[in-house]
Image (tube, grey):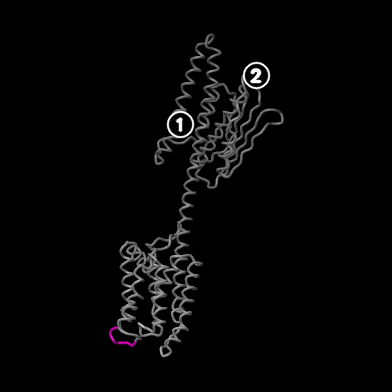
């Protein structure tokens, strides 16, 4: 019975282990052997052959000695042979029809008790047959069903016991069959419980993997949307400003209009290049062509805004250098904050201050709120502040934005740096 339970235990394969657990390569030799045996038992014909061997073993080991005259049974030889076959043959299909197999064996043992036939050398034809059958039921069905099946089987064996003793008073009989089924049920239920646990663990592992993949995809989409928004918003704002200038001075100052159109062309090409770079990162994650912008590029960004008419003062204190993600987030926050100034307060005077400390970088962008073109249509509120705040929170920082008491608007972003990289000298001020 224990060997049979172990075969079923190995048949379903080793338990699915969550990520981070040791693989079979480092498992003990016994676990590796179990995995190999389990792989062989997954073949469709192998379990059928093993069931036939189990049935043959039960017949040969427990009824064979009686038929060969080596042990004493009860009843005629043909009756012993028929009952021996009927008590073993159903085990061949026990996994296909577990309940039918159990019912057939109960009928065989009940009839043998009533007819006074003992086809093994033990009292009440004791053997593992009923234990194997109830093991299969407990393995294949839920606990409630298997317990009901066991109760009915035990009741049937007990109910015919008294009548069998009355009909054959000289023949020893007892309720050993009901006792044989007890360890069979416990082993089968344990195997089923382990299999259910392993399946639930596999489902949970698959669900966690799917959730992780979905979260990664969502974060990637969010990052891409932030980058595209920053690039497009900045470029279109610059194009809108320069195109407005070109329209106003087209007839009076054609040279200045040509410069504005050239700036529009440059901004358009730059935006296209950045968008292509972002899309290339999605299609080919391993592609490292091009370096993402960082704080080293803020001076050029300031120069671009100044060329497009923004009155901007810029100062940078400190010489710390940060990792790539902090550098890019700082650049994008500055870009979006200055773009918001040009969109919502065209003609305002702005200031940009960056404090590069070893533990954090602080970005402060303010404007005086003066609008030099009062007849221009107000810009619709967008996703700029939300994107800047998401970039700050991504690094465990914060972003504060709001109106100043004396007029104007202020944006303050603080990005903590968990690990201080190597530094290079040279703060800038303009």
Residue that label 1 marks? 275
Residue 50 drawn above or below residue 316: below
| Relative to 354, 108 lies left or right | left
Name which residue lies at 62% across and 34% down. 411
Query: Which span of residues is magenta-colored?
Result: 67-72
Residue that label 2 marks? 374
Q: Position of residue 410 (x, y in %)?
A: 64, 32
Question: Toward the viewer: 71 or 403?
Answer: 71
* Residue that sits furthest to the right in the current view: 405
SS of the residue under disc 1: helix
| Relative to 179, 38 lies left or right | left
Name which residue lies at 38% across and 74% down. 3
**Looking at the figure, which quarter contains the N terminus?**
bottom left
Residue 243 tag number: none
Question: Within the image, what quadrant is residue 390 found in?
Answer: top right
Name which residue lies at 45% across and 35% down. 278
Magenta: main secondary structure equals: loop
* Residue that sits furthest to the bottom in the current view: 170
Tag 2: Cα neighbours inside 10 Å, few (<14), some, or many (≥20)? few
Q: Position of residue 185 (x, y in %)?
A: 46, 72
How many angstroms separate mark 1 from mark 2 (CA)?
33 Å
Tag 1: Cα neighbours inside 10 Å, few (<14), some, or many (≥20)? some
Q: Position of residue 73 (x, y in %)?
A: 35, 86
Question: Toward the viewer: 194 or 168?
Answer: 168
């Amino acid at each position: 019975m224990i060997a049979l339970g172990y075969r079923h235990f190995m048949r379903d394969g080793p338990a699915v282990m969550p990520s981070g657990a040791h693989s079979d390569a480092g498992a003990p030799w016994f676990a590796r052997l179990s995995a190999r045996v389990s792989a062989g038992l997954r073949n469709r014909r192998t379990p059928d052959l093993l069931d036939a061997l189990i049935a043959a073993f039960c017949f040969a080991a427990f009824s064979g000695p009686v038929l060969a005259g080596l042990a004493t049974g009860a009843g005629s030889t043909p009756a012993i042979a028929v009952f021996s076959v009927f008590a073993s043959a159903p085990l061949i299909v026990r996994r296909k029809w577990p309940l039918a197999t159990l019912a057939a064996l109960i009928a065989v043992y009940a009839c043998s008790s009533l007819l006074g036939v003992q086809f093994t050398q033990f009292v009440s034809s004791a053997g593992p047959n009923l234990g194997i059958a109830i093991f299969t039921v407990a393995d294949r069905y839920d606990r409630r069903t298997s317990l009901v099946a066991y109760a009915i089987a035990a009741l049937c064996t007990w109910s015919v016991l008294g009548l069998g003793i009355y009909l054959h008073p000289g023949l020893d009989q007892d309720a050993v069959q009901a006792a044989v089924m007890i360890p069979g049920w416990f082993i089968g239920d344990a195997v089923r419980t382990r299999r259910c646990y392993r399946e639930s663990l596999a489902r949970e592992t698959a669900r966690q993997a799917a959730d992780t993949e979905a979260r990664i995809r969502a974060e990637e989409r969010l990052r891409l949307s932030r980058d595209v928004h920053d690039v497009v918003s900045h470029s279109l704002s610059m194009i809108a400003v320069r195109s407005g200038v070109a329209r106003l001075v087209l007839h009076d100052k054609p040279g200045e209009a040509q410069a504005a159109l050239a700036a529009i062309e440059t901004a358009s090409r730059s935006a296209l290049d950045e968008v292509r770079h972002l899309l290339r990162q999605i299609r080919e994650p391993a592609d490292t062509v091009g370096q993402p912008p960082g704080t080293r590029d803020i001076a050029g960004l300031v120069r671009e805004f100044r060329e497009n008419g923004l009155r901007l003062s810029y100062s940078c204190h400190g010489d710390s250098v940060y990792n790539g993600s902090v550098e890019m987030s700082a650049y994008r926050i500055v870009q979006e904050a200055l773009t918001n100034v040009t969109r919502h307060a065209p003609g305002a005077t702005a200031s940009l201050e960056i404090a590069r400390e070893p533990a954090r970088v602080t970005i402060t962008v303010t404007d005086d709120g003066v609008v030099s073109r009062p007849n221009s249509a107000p810009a619709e509120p967008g996703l700029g502040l939300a994107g800047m705040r998401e970039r700050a929170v991504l690094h465990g920082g914060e972003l504060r934005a709001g109106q100043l008491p004396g007029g104007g608007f202020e944006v303050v972003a603080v990005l903590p740096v968990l690990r201080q990289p190597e530094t290079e000298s040279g703060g800038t001020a303009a």
